[in-house]
Image (cartoon, rainbow, N blue to C red):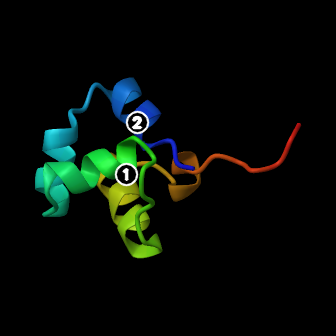
Amino acid sequence: MNRIKEVLEEKGIKQTWLADKLGKSYNMVNGYVQNRQQPRLEILFEIANILEIDVKELLKSNKEN
């Protein structure tokens, strides 16, 4: 699971803008945002770079607290 949707909302960024910056289709980015599919690790790093955040901020922990 990823936090791409939350980070985009926090920053007020549209999925279409991210798709353009990544050179990916809106449908592909929407799949990432809705957690229907997970981006490859290198794409996750690219998203973090574009959003100017640490890649760890895009990941949800699978540990129960």
Image point (45%, 31%), residue name: 6
Image point (13%, 63%), residue name: 23
| SS assignment at label 2 | helix
What amino acid is at disc 2? Lys
What amino acid is at disc 1? Tyr
As measured in the structure, the alpha-carbon distance from the residue carrying label 2 to the one carrying label 1 is 8 Å
Q: Is residue 25 above or below residue 63?
A: below
Mark 2 surroundings: few (<14), some (14-19) or many (≥20) residues within 10 A: some
Q: Name the residue under label 2.
A: 5
Q: Name the residue under label 1.
A: 32
In this view, the residue in front, 33 or 47, is 33
| SS assignment at label 1 | helix
Image point (58%, 51%), residue name: 59
Rendering coords of residue 1 (x, y %): 57, 50
Rendering coords of residue 7 (x, y %): 43, 35
Instruction: Specify the label residue 12 is tagged with.
Output: none
Q: Specify which label sits upstream in the sequence, 2 or 1.
A: 2
Image point (14%, 42%), residue name: 17
In this view, the residue in front, 35 or 45, is 35
Mark 1 surroundings: few (<14), some (14-19) or many (≥20) residues within 10 A: many
Q: Quadrant of residue 9?
A: top left
Rendering coords of residue 28 (x, y %): 24, 56
